[in-house]
Image: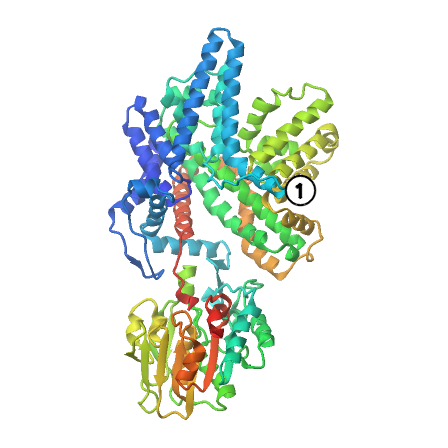
Amino acid sequence: MGKKYSIFITVLFCLFTFGFGAALLLLPDREFSEQENRYLTQFEAPTLDNVFGENGEFMANFEKYVNDQFPLRDEWIHLKAWSERLIGKQENNDVYFGGEGQQTLFAQYTPPSDLAQRVEYVNQLGANVDVPVYFALIPDKSYVWADRLPDNAPLVDDGSTIQQAQGLVSGDVNFIDLSGALSGDDVFYRTDHHWSTMGAYQGYVALMTTMNGTCTILDSEPTLVSDTFYGTTWSSAGAAWVEPDEMYTWVPEGGLTGHTTVTRYPNGSPVDGSLYDLSRLEVKDKYSMFLGGNQGLCVIRNPDAEGGRLLVVRDSYADSLAPFLSLDYQEVHLFDLRYNRLSLNQYVQDNGIDQVLVLYSNSNFSTDANLALLGL
Amino acid sequence: MVFSTPYFLFLYLPAVLFLYYISPFRYRNFILLVFNLLFYGWGEPVYILLMIFTIVLDYFAGLIVHRCKQRDDDRGARWAVGVSLALNLAILFFFKYWDLVATTLQSIGVPMPVLNLTLPIGISFYTFQTMTYPVDIYRGDAEVPKNLVSFGTFVTLFPQLIAGPIIKYKELADQMNFRTHSPEQFASGVQMFTIGLAKKVLLANSIGQLWDVYLATPGAELTTLGAWLGILAFSMQLYFDFSGYSDMAVGMGRMMGFEFLANFNYPYLAKSATEFWRRWHISLGSWFREYLYIPLGGNRVKAPRLVFNLFVVWACTGIWHGASWNFLIWGLYYFLIIVFERFFFSKVLNKLPGWVGHIYGLFIVMVGWALFAVEDFAAMGLYLKAMFGMGAGLLDSSFLYYLRNYLPILIIAILASTPLAAALWKKLSVRARQVAIPVLVLAGLALATAYLVDGTYNPFLYFRF
């Protein structure tokens, strides 16, 4: 290597390291990452206490700060996902790429090791309350769309969770097997773990067949409200090549007769809500369009329905299902164990509930830490 | 601090290089010492005091050795060497092995407190490094350092502080006082550093995920091919991790005018355990040879004593690698095999075709890695059983998935662990190389950056409801 050439290589290296270092220090810091849907770490000045204190908080925070505020962070993440794909990987950051053109993303699924204990909480609820208790688990996307998975992918739902759960329920609980309920190319989002509006409708039909003996057939077609939905699985995978999903509404706002009302309790006190909150389509977390997102309690009232009062112990899958349920029940109460510490048994008595449905997706049922509250 | 992080690569390293090069030569060791201490103390600032204590202790021990020798006081010089070695080993023992001994004694009923101290980073490396100093002075292999700063810089030199190579004082003494800097050396350092970074981030970290899968697999579910795939992954991860760090050290050293010796020489080409240890972590092997094996008498002794010497060296080599009994077992495993090779098997091996030797060498090394990598004895037993066909069958569907997913990167890694790439590189014309170097350097830095930034990727998964 000649001197001039060596200087060229030296300058190249210094431009890269000094350049990104300087950009990191000089560019304004970001508050929030849309892609990751979280607040990013901000700079914290060093003090005697946080440098020499017990935990070295300054150093730990500074490392996070540099990582979070690194210039072109989202682009680097996409580059890594691309690189993994080019080297032949069928997964990145615990997400499988599947289907045609690797356009379908699957969060890896691990069955719970303590399923018996989890089902036992549901059994306790069944023993506690005087009204019929139904229990259903929504199969994971990797079960319903198994044909799109990479060959031999190990961390998937093979149907055993639902099968085992069915064997564990007591006589007080009516188990509804949803493993065959969902089929078709549009029942899940490709970029998100949730079922789609169409998937939720199929789930609704299966649930109502057991719980109500009948269900409402909608004449109208679903309405396309967004074609730019990138879900959480997409965020984890950093898979920039994947096309966004479409989102649909189906039940008319106000129900079929225009009398349906939604009361939300985002902070414990009632607020008027809607079946589909279209303003939520402006943010990254577009799935919160359904009933406006997570909340401890939400009540949908349809005075024209024939059924009575249904309480659903919910996870987020129930939000896109609830508009359909409101077609058949005068009241649908969506009760979230994470934000609502009222006694379920008491709530059922106080509100004249006629039926209870415990509905979880397989992955949430496997991981939720609040199931013990079911039996209280 | 570790090299493979964005804050090191884009803030610390540029800051060091900038201040280093704008300073006149006589201040450069001082600048380095300050940054070395920042590097060392980043994770645990109070340990800077420990480091300063070590530096001062050894510095004066060396001076006393020097004075005693000038006065022909061999006894005094030996005392000073002995006290320094004893204190260094005591510090190493206290921080690294106390809890191992305490928990082991507790398990047989002797009450000993477990301290749960954070291990000072690089303590195994820099302790061995500082211990060479009084010995080298005593043996007359090196001069005493100019001053405390120069010696402190040697002890703490950040490029090789945490993962070697272990540099003997005599190898670096001259460079501490005088070294040249040139664009040629810097550019060569850039290439070496980028190769090391790519080895660590692109190969070791990626393949390590495959090993993580098999390490986490319950022993009863391990299949034979799965266990071997796992150990192959670990073999590649460890080699590229370690040699990647060494390459980065050599590269950054060159950027600041230092030359360190190579630490690896294609270890997986070895045709025996004996040869493997001449190719693997060379600086550690040569340290034990010069400062333990030869002082014990080396191989110029009768057979029983030779076996004893080998036993001591391999027991120490094993336990040096970590405070867990499996490392001792791993060291003794090499003791047995090397004795076996020395007294018998090497004569047989020499007569066999080369490929038999390669298979034998790799087999020994990979079984050894299973002892090294699985710290829990029960799990280690199950892992070895699976490797030797007594697991849950030959293969399962997850093996096919992982093989399919990791085959391309494993092939790249296997090729990269042979001299093939270097041979091809030499065949390129000078012009082609001149075009390739900046492209490869930029591609290596960019891809490594992408993997490092992604490694911290932490999307808030609101899907948990």
Compared across the picture, whether B283 is left or right of B443 comes to right
- What chain is tagged by disc 1? B
- At x 31%, y 90%, the residue is A259
Q: Nearer the viewer, residue B210 or A336?
A: A336
Q: Is residue A16 visible?
A: no
- At x 50%, y 63%, the residue is A108
Compared across the picture, whether B86 is left or right of A167 comes to left
Q: Nearer the viewer, residue B131 or B172?
A: B131
- At x 51%, y 15%, the residue is B138
Q: Position of residue B25 (x, y in %)?
A: 31, 23
Q: Position of residue A281 (x, y in %)?
A: 31, 72
Q: Dividing the image into 4 quarters, which one contains the N terminus of chain A? A: top left
- At x 63%, y 32%, the residue is B315
Q: Position of residue B334 (x, y in %)?
A: 65, 35
In this view, A296 is above or below B339: below
Q: Is residue B72 visible?
A: yes
Number of marks in picture:
1
Q: Position of residue B12 (x, y in %)?
A: 34, 38
Q: Nearer the viewer, residue A169 or A27?
A: A169
Where is mark 1, residue-wise?
B363
In this view, B77 is above or below B411: above
Compared across the picture, whether B362 is left or right of B425 comes to right
Residue type marked 1: Phe
In this view, A341 is above or below B42: below
As helix, strand or loop, the secondary structure at mark 1 comes to: helix
Residue at the extreme top? B71
Q: Decide: few, some or many residues near mark 1? Use Cα within 10 Å; few <14, some 14-19, many ≥20.
A: some
